[in-house]
Amino acid sequence: MSLKSTGSTIWIEITEIELSVEKVYAWSVLDNCGAVVLFSGTVRDFSDGRPGVTKLSYEAYESVAFDRMNDLANRVLTEFVGIGRVAVIHRLGEMAPGDSTVIISVSAAHREQAYEASRFLIDTLKRSVPIWKKESWQGGSDWALGANSVKDI
């Protein structure tokens, strides 16, 4: 399943297809914004002392995750000054080292607001959106620590 909403100021998406940093960046740029901060979370080949991570698998309570991601984007538009556009995009399914799992993009009049809003989005998303990560490595697999500690925002 894929959920997507792209408006003039907010792009929210949950998808199983490969994420495109280039497309998100191009959408984020506005003439009245002097900064675009784009964060791309990628799969690395180790985790918590476990070398040889071969893949991550993401699952979500998709309708709730989508709504919470949209709520977070709207909070950024109302609580941070000078924000132009906000994108929150998460991939589900299996991904290999190097694959992008999440993209957060914020355009703003100035870099300080873009950085602060971007950091708020990724940190709050990880704490409050029901998306779970299973790590597979040479010799086993397990749900990532903290995967079930979703909190309300």
Image: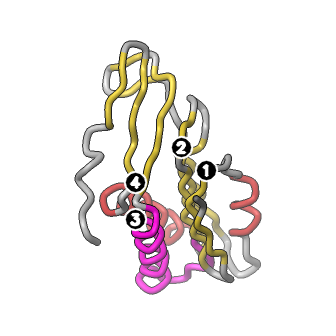
Residue 120 is situated, as x and y percent measured from the top left of the image, at: 40, 65
Q: Which mark is residue 120?
A: 3
Mark in the foreground, 4 or 2: 2
Name the secondary structure under disc 2. Answer: strand
> Looking at the image, do the residues carrying marks 1 and 3 touch, with CB atoms under 8 Å apart?
no
| Residue drawn at the location 36% of the way across and 25% of the way down | 141
Which residue in the structure is indicated by mark 4? 131
Chief secondary structure of the magenta portion: helix
Q: Is residue 36 left or right of residue 82?
A: right
Residue 71 inside the magenta-drawn segment: yes
Name the secondary structure under disc 1. Answer: loop
Measured along the vertical axis of the image, is residue 128 above or below residue 51?
Answer: below
| Residue drawn at the location 23% of the way across and 53% of the way down | 149
N-term-proximal mark, 4 vs 2: 2
N-term-proximal mark, 4 vs 1: 1
The amino acid on which the numbered mark 3 sits, given as a three-letter code, is Phe
Whole-number angstrom distance, CA of label 3 to CA of label 4: 17 Å
N-term-proximal mark, 1 vs 2: 1
Q: Which mark is residue 16?
A: 1
Residue 79 is situated, as x and y percent measured from the top left of the image, at: 41, 83
> Looking at the image, do the residues carrying marks 3 and 2 touch, with CB atoms under 8 Å apart?
no
